[in-house]
Image (tube, rainbow, N blue to C red):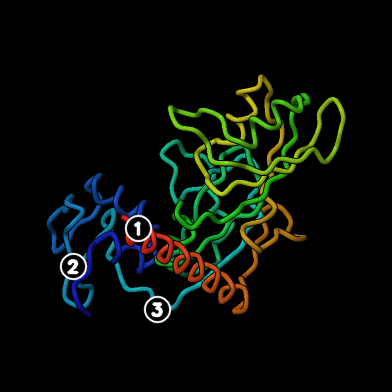
Amino acid sequence: MAEERLQKLLAHAGVASRRKAEELISAGRVSVNGQTVTELGSKADLTVDRVKVDGRVLTASKRHVYFALNKPKNCVTTVHDPQGRPTVMSFFKGVQDRIYPVGRLDYASEGLLLLTNDGDFANALMSPARHILKTYLVKVNGTITPEQEEEFRRGIPMHGRQTAPAFLKLIRKGENPWYEVRLAEGRQNQIRIMFKHFGYLVEKLKRIKIGFLELGDLKPGAYRTLTNAEVARFRAMLHTIADTNGHAASKHHEKR
């Protein structure tokens, strides 16, 4: 096996996504042959080097696995939590593979979450450039006006940067109405912050779809393995988007 950048090697081994692996390296939690490594450009080869993460020896993942979980409320979307809160990993105690969450759902949110040990798959799915749509059902403590709905769809200022265009539809009227929201970006607490921009609080938030994949009838805390057809469909979708983006970038370069 040829040498690979550590963050890619950790992702392939099912430790974490490539982005999270970079954080582990920068935090000094990775060592190669007994030496702590913090440089992101560092390389290693699992066939000849002894790589450890938090003191645990790393071995190459022998197979890729893909799971869909209905994440309940009141657990965090991480492998470990420094505050000792329950994590989504508690639902996978019988799974031997070292899997990790793809993206995030905040502590109070629930719904569809993917977990895998396939670093390239996770990295591609989380890439902002892929624009994978995610669909949510959101219960709010009041109804926003038609003008506010249009502003929500166009994007609002958030942490100094405008949010990307979003889909918004009122699906159940009442004092505490329900909305369907679709986002192609996934900034932390984005939907809650967007409604708060208009003076309303999100009471419930549930993700029901990632790309084409629906939550279906999975109960909270239950998970299932993705079918080969679903994995293949995700790969085809990601490949098509990558080709489209590459073609657009090439055309832009030609015009310059």
Residue at the top extreme of this rendering: 199
Q: Is residue 40 left or right of residue 106?
A: left
For mark 3, does the 10 Å Cα neighbourhood hold few (<14), some (14 to 19), or many (20 or more) residues?
A: few
Q: Compared with residue 152, is residue 243 higher up or lower down, i.e. above or below?
A: below
Mark 2 / mark 3, whichever is N-terminal:
2
**Distance between mark 2 and mark 1 Cα atoms:** 40 Å
State the SS at label 3.
loop
| Image quarter in which the C terminus is found | bottom left
Tell me the mark number nearer the camera, choosing from 2 and 1. 1
Identify the residue position indicated by label 3 in the image. 62
Check if mark 1's residue and mark 3's residue have beta carbons within 8 Å.
Answer: no
For mark 2, does the 10 Å Cα neighbourhood hold few (<14), some (14 to 19), or many (20 or more) residues?
A: some
Identify the residue position indicated by label 2 in the image. 44
Mark 1 / mark 3, whichever is N-terminal:
3
Q: Compared with residue 154, is residue 136 higher up or lower down, i.e. above or below?
A: below
The three-letter code of the residue at mark 3 reads: Lys
Q: Position of residue 142 (x, y in %)?
A: 77, 24
Q: Is residue 176 left or right of residue 211?
A: right
The three-letter code of the residue at mark 1 reads: Lys
Identify the residue position indicated by label 1 in the image. 255
